[in-house]
Image (tube, grey):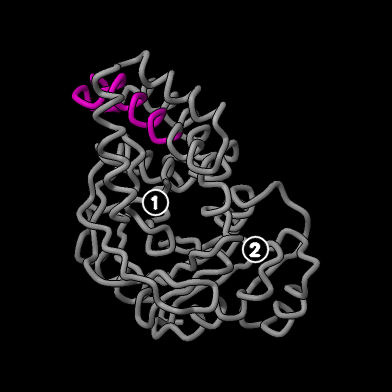
């Protein structure tokens, strides 16, 4: 490794992703950046993952033991990491060629930034390209509304972020990345890289897809923290009612879509009681966005 270059520590949390994890490992090991520390934290998989990890002993660091889930695994890896730059790459996602070098160069060019992120490529479980994900310029306001356009595997952070705000919130199991971007954005500038840095798989068994309707509970947890944070800008703090109306409306529609009528109506009722006119407007906006495919969900 070149001591003049910053070390990049990449953590992969893994559990029974043997079908995909070797592709993930190869995407890291084939990067053209020479200073990478790669750590796989496996939760004790029983599907052959361990045999794959053993093949790479000496080229990667890995452990395979029971843990408390994805958030716990990421924190475990980041605590072990020695890099000046950190990231996490799920066991069914991959980096595009040259993405690590690009992220390092952007962080070097933007010394004020605590985090950089790029665009991405979405594929199905077989690797067939579905679309290109354009993340767009950073907006803390959009994140506070839980409208997260940042593709998680396309994110790289300075170690200073972890040292300042701590690790992933282990009470969260779906929207922990959104929570981390918001917490980072309250303390550090965030810079957008307008090129694909990662590929993410979108398929029925993927947690983010299979449990889409349950995101609203994570959002409630995140928002409770946000609106008690003294660092939240006053203009966003004033939008608390509108933010809750939005997430309850979206949650209600997502539950209705999968036939969970009781939960759907309950959340829509909560949104309507908070702000009936905004609830109706948000319903119209969301239905239109779902139909055109601009956002995930219904």
What is the chief secondary structure element of the magenta stretch?
helix
Whether 241 is among the magenta residues is yes
Question: For the magenta stretch, what is the residue range?
Answer: 232-251
* Residue 296: mark in rendering: 1
Nearer the camera: disc 1 or disc 2: 1
Q: Residue at x 36, y 39 (%)?
A: 146
Whether 175 is among the magenta residues is no
Alpha carbon separation for disc pair 1 and 2? 24 Å
Total marks shown come to 2
Q: Residue at x 30, y 21 (%)?
A: 240
The reply, left or right, for residue 205 in relation to residue 272 is right
Please tell me how crowded label 1 is: few (under 14), some (14-19), or many (20+) other residues with Cα within 10 Å.
Answer: few
Q: Circle 1 — which element? A: loop
- Quarter where residue 284 is shown: top left
Is 65 placed above or below 132 here? above
Q: Position of residue 98 (x, y in %)?
A: 35, 81
Residue for badge 2: 14
Q: Position of residue 166 (x, y in %)?
A: 49, 41
Q: Circle 2 — which element? A: strand
Which sits earlier in the primary sequence, circle 1 or circle 2? Answer: 2
Q: Residue at x 32, y 42 (%)?
A: 287
The reply, left or right, for residue 207 in relation to residue 180 is right
Front residue of this view, candidates 8 and 205: 205
Q: Position of residue 233 (x, y in %)?
A: 23, 27
Q: Residue lying furthest right in this view?
A: 46
């Amino acid at each position: 490794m070149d001591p003049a270059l910053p070390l990049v520590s990449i953590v992969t949390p893994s559990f029974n992703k043997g079908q995909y994890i070797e592709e993930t490992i190869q995407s890291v090991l084939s990067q053209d950046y020479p200073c990478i520390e790669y750590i796989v934290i496996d939760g004790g998989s029983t599907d052959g993952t361990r045999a794959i990890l053993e093949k790479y002993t000496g080229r990667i660091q890995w452990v395979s033991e029971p843990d408390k889930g994805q958030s716990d695994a990421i924190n475990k890896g980041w605590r072990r990491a020695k890099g000046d730059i950190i990231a996490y790459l799920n066991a069914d996602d991959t980096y595009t060629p040259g993405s690590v070098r690009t992220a390092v160069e952007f962080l070097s060019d933007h010394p004020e930034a605590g985090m950089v992120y790029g665009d991405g490529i979405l594929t199905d479980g077989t690797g067939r390209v579905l679309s290109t994900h354009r993340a767009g310029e950073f907006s803390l306001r959009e994140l506070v509304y839980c409208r997260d356009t940042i593709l998680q595997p396309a994110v790289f952070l300075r170690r200073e972020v972890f040292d300042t705000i701590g690790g992933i919130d282990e009470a969260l199991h779906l929207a922990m990345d959104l929570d981390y971007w918001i917490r980072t954005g309250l303390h550090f500038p965030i810079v957008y890289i307008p090129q694909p840095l990662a590929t993410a798989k979108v398929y029925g068994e993927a947690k983010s897809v299979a449990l889409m309707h349950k995101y609203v509970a994570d959002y409630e947890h995140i928002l409770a923290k946000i609106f008690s944070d003294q660092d939240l800008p006053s203009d966003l703090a004033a939008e608390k009612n509108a933010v809750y109306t939005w997430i309850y409306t979206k949650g209600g529609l997502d539950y209705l879509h999968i036939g969970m009528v009781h939960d759907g109506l309950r959340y829509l009722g909560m949104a309507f009681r908070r702000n009936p006119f905004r609830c109706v407007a948000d319903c119209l906006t969301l239905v239109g966005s779902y139909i055109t495919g601009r956002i995930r969900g219904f």
